[in-house]
Structures are given as C-alpha cells and as structure tokens.
Amino acid sequence: MTEVEPEFINLTLDREDKKEIAIRIRNIDRDYLFGAVEFSTGFDSMFLSEASFGVDPKLNQETAIILHIDASKITPGQNYNTSVEIASNAENGEISIPVTVRVYRNPLKLLLHCG
C-alpha cells in the first residue's frame, strides 16, 4: 500500500514566484515499491524532479518527488489545472493529485484598464 502527501495542491502565486513542493510517497508494505510519476496535462511552467521512483523498505520508508513551478511562465488571471499521476506496483497502484495554479494579475495593469 502507498500513501501520498499532499492530497491536492491549490496555489495562487505572484508573477515572479518560483515554488517547489515535495510530493512524499510512503511505502507502508514490506515489499519494494516502484513506479512512475507524470502530469495528466503538461505545462511549460511546471516540471517534476523525477519521472520514476523506488522505495526499498529495508533502507527507508519514503521518497519525495519535487514539483517545480515557475510563475513567470503562467498567464496571470488564468487557472492552470492538471494532476500528478502516480502509478506503482502497490495494491492501490494509481493515485492522482489534483493541481491548480493561478498567478495574480498585475494590479497596475488593472488600474490602467479601468481608468
């Protein structure tokens, strides 16, 4: 069996933000856990540190995949929706983590458009 944290990711970022979020994959069985990690829909603004993983329970109980987000590549005001898909050899072999990222609109541009 596999446990994953976080269960979902929902972020609002400033235009210049670069964010890293650890996705922790825990092996709660006695067998070697391995699998693949990918996005359901890819965006230039997001990438994963690894495409695959392995957790040997004799050495450790968890591993982390890092989700990197570059807000400068995201159009302000739009929601970017995808999910991190984790497929493994565990009993609950497929896990999906919903991801929503949005970037604040530039307040100065809003003032210019209003007046």
Image (cartoon, rainbow, N blue to C red):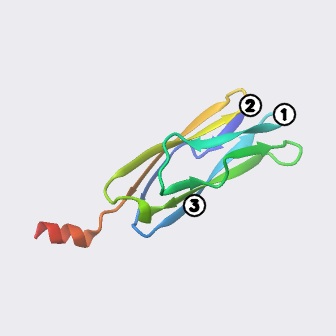
Whether residues under marks 2 and 1 lie with C-beta atoms below 8 angstroms apart, the answer is yes
SS label for mark 2: loop
Q: Where is 89 relative to 114, above or below?
A: above
- Residue positioned most to the top: 91
Find disc 3 in the rendering and name its residue: 20
Q: From the viewer's perspective, is the residue at label 2 or at label 1 nearer?
A: 2
Which one is earlier in the sequence, the residue at label 2 or at label 3?
Answer: 3
The quarter of the picture where the C terminus appears is: bottom left
Which one is earlier in the sequence, the residue at label 3 or at label 1?
Answer: 3
Q: Amino acid at mark 3?
A: Glu
Residue 77 picture quarter: bottom left
The residue sitting at 24% across, 73% down in the picture is: 108
What's the CA distance linking mark 3 and mark 1? 29 Å
- Residue positioned most to the left: 115
Give the percent coordinates (x, y) of residue 55: 79, 44
Residue 61 picture quarter: top right
The residue sitting at 67% across, 38% down in the picture is: 3
Q: Where is 95 relative to 112, above or below?
A: above
Give the percent coordinates (x, y) of residue 10: 45, 50
Find disc 2 in the rendering and name its residue: 89
What's the CA distance linking mark 2 and mark 3? 26 Å
The residue sitting at 70% across, 45% down in the picture is: 52
Q: On the rendered structure, is 58 left or right of 44?
A: right
SS label for mark 3: strand
Q: Amino acid at mark 2?
A: Asn
Q: Where is 41 relative to 75, above or below?
A: above
Find disc 1 in the rendering and name its residue: 31
